[in-house]
Image: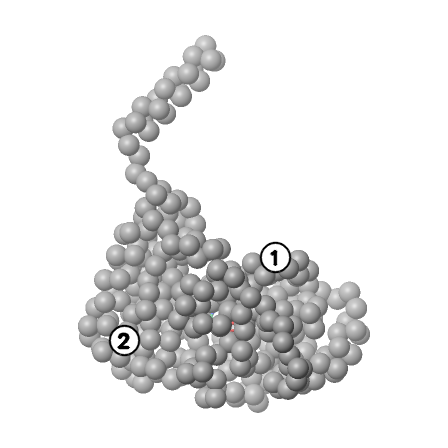
């Protein structure tokens, strides 16, 4: 496994790879089985797997955990090696950003709701670095976890809007045995807060069988409110049923694929999670039944 820090070294290696199918897994390190599931997915379909490890300062707000974000580089390199990763790109901030840097990607409306509203500038910073990584590594495909559903939707939007020549592959959420989505930030949680955090999974489970937006939201909120009542460190930010691509809030008129997306701050740690729903749409009325009856009658009449 090669480990490179500079853009120049990366470009030399990329040139040697020629037409190989390259899979890129962008990460901020502190790798856990959630990240490695993305690597395994890339491994199955690509000739070469590249993992980037870069704690991106542009996607952290001034009050956020950039300085204390875990950076266990040797551990990360060891598990990449064991997983058969060919190349790790681990640039420093000055390796990746030119001193006179000015231009950034703007996430647009998707970047200012939910996580974007709680973390202003987060999606612009994330997309700016993801685009740089895609330009540098020139992968055939890049793999993103559904855990960060709004990030995934933003990356897909960017790739479409800016004609980036890469396939974006989505990977399922990997969870701890008690359901908490794996995250590099889980290690910040105190034991009681870690226990409360399991309410997030229980809320998603409660919502996942509902077929209307209001029922799903109600089911999740009940569990989350109970967790907040039991532990003052558990503060719910949102639990909302949204369109998986636009993050527009859905209601009981909507049908088809949806996400119940939620975020809570537990202690000082922001946790996000989501589950997929299939909404049934508005209940059928007597008029719908009559209209269907008329259509079937007309069909039979046409065949007779
Ligand atoms: P991060 O290092 O937090 O920036 O995450 C890097 C990539 O790993 C992103 O595409 C995340 O969505 C993905 N990821 C993080 N945690 C999980 C998880 N528990 N299951 C699946 N993918 C994950």
Residue depicted at x 55% and y 76%: 27
Frontmost residue, 148 versus 196: 148
Q: Residues within 10 Å of mark 2 (few under 14, many from 20)?
A: many
| Image quadrant in which you'd find residue 174 | bottom left
Q: How is the image coloured?
A: one colour
The residue under label 1 is: 161
Residue 9, given in percent of the width and then of the height, sits at: 74, 83
Residue depicted at x 47% and y 55%: 246
Q: How many marks?
A: 2
Counting residues from the N terminus, which is met first, the one under dot 1 or under dot 2? 1
Residue depicted at x 44% and y 68%: 116
Residue depicted at x 68% and y 63%: 140
Mark 2 residue's CB less than 8 Å from ligand 1 = no
Q: Residues within 10 Å of mark 1 (few under 14, many from 20)?
A: few
* Residue 183 visible in the displayed image: yes
Whether 21 is drawn above or below 290: the answer is below
Q: Nearer the viewer, mark 1 or mark 2?
A: 1
Image side of residue 286 versus residue 269, left or right: left
Residue 241, given in percent of the width and then of the height, sits at: 36, 56
Q: Residue furthest left?
A: 229
Whether 130 is drawn above or below 254: the answer is below
Q: Secondary structure at mark 2?
A: strand
Residue 111, given in percent of the width and then of the height, sits at: 48, 64
Q: Secondary structure at mark 1?
A: helix
**Which quarter shows the N terminus?**
bottom right
Residue 254, given in percent of the width and then of the height, sits at: 38, 45
Which label was assigned to residue 234? 2
* Residue 173 visible in the displayed image: no
């Amino acid at each position: 496994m090669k480990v490179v820090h500079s853009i120049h070294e990366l470009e030399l290696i990329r040139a040697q790879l020629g037409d190989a199918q390259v899979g890129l897994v962008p990460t901020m390190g502190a790798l856990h089985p959630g990240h490695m599931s993305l690597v395994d997915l890339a491994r199955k379909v690509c000739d070469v797997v590249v993992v980037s490890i870069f704690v991106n300062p542009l996607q952290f707000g001034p009050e956020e955990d950039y300085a204390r974000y875990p950076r266990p580089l040797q551990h990360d390199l060891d598990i990449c090696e064991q997983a058969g990763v060919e190349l790790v790109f681990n640039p420093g901030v000055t390796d990746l950003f030119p001193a006179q840097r000015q231009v950034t990607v703007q996430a647009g409306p998707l970047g200012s709701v939910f996580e974007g509203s709680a973390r202003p500038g987060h999606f612009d910073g994330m997309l700016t670095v993801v685009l740089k990584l895609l330009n540098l590594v020139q992968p055939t495909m890049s793999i993103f976890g559904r855990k960060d559903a709004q990030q995934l939707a933003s990356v897909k939007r960017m790739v479409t809007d800016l004609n980036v020549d890469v396939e974006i592959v989505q990977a399922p959420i990997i969870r701890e045995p008690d359901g908490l989505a794996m995250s590099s930030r889980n290690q910040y949680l105190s034991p009681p807060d870690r226990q409360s955090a399991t309410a997030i999974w229980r809320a998603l489970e409660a919502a996942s069988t509902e077929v209307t937006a209001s029922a799903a939201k109600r089911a999740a909120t009940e569990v989350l409110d109970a967790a907040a009542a039991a532990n003052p460190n558990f503060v719910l930010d949102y639990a909302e049923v949204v369109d998986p691509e636009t993050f527009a809030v859905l209601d009981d008129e909507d049908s088809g694929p949806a996400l119940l997306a939620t975020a809570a701050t537990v202690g000082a740690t922001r946790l996000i999670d989501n589950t997929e729903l299939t909404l049934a749409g508005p209940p059928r009325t007597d008029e719908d039944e009559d209209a269907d009856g008329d259509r079937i009658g007309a069909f039979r009449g046409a065949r007779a």
